[in-house]
Image: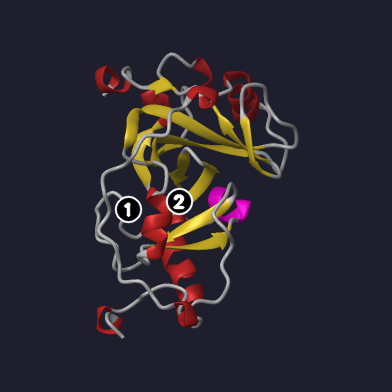
Amino acid sequence: MRQRAARFLILVVLSLPVLVHPGTSPATASGPEDRPPMPALGRGVFLIASPLLLDPNFRETVVFLCDYGVEGAMGVIVNRPTTVLLSEVLPDLAVLKGTSHLLFAGGPVQPTGVLMLFRVAQEPPGTRQVMKGVYLGGNLETLDRLVTKPEPTETFRAYAGYAGWGPGQLEFEMAQGSWATVRADPTKIFSQDPSELWSELIESLRGPRVIRLEPAEMGR
């Protein structure tokens, strides 16, 4: 385990390239008359995978969008915890020894790199604000403090890899009905049971038909 884990590296957020993930299997899009307004694509929204999105990289996933612009988009999958301890992935960090923090599978791009989401009051050096109180990065001093002396509302999660889209790719997938957007809630990232997150958000979208839910609806 340690030989495999030793290949993991903390990714430097400010130098992350936008890399394209493998093509997804698009769901059938709803017509404009079916869709109530959704949050626009941008930092701090959830991408909710359609039940018809069968790509194993993204089936039944919730992606927290961390960056978005003309060069593409990137985010991390927040509902796929692994059984791997973070202390096994980063064995040289003494502060993690004996802790039970798990590594999450953040996406198919650079899967041997580790990114962290911090929920803290002040922006740590070398991180990027995604939404109020939530920062993306790999600041090890902040990690050390959150492991040893966290404030009551502070926490973090670590992700192996991330999801990336090239220019126009995510917009195309949205038009195909592969994703819906929901305003992100930090509680759902850091506190909620990740095994329930996708189904809960899908259920919230079922009534207004924001997203295709049943194969039988295809072509209507």
Between residue 52 and residue 80, name the one nearer to us.
52
Residue 134 versus residue 8 in the image, above or below: below
Q: CA distance from mark 2 to mark 1?
A: 9 Å
For the N terminus, the image quarter is top left
125 in magenta: no
Magenta segment range?
A: 185-191
Label 1 element class? loop
Residue at 34% of width from left, 30% of height from top?
A: 110
Residue at 25% of width from left, 59% of height from top?
A: 25
Q: Is residue 59 left or right of residue 49?
A: left
User: Residue 20 is drawn in which quadrant?
Assistant: top left
For the C terminus, the image quarter is bottom left
Between residue 153 and residue 164, name the one nearer to us.
164
Residue denoted by label 2: 63
Does any portion of residue 189 appear in the rendered image? yes
Q: Are marks 2 and 1 in contact (CB under 8 Å)?
A: yes
Residue 72: x percent and y percent? 45, 41
Label ID, residue 153: none
Amino acid marked by disc 2: Val
Residue 130: x percent and y percent? 62, 41
Residue denoted by label 1: 58
Amino acid marked by disc 1: Phe
Between residue 117 and residue 74, name the one nearer to us.
74
Secondary structure mostly taken by the magenta-highlighted segment of the chain: helix
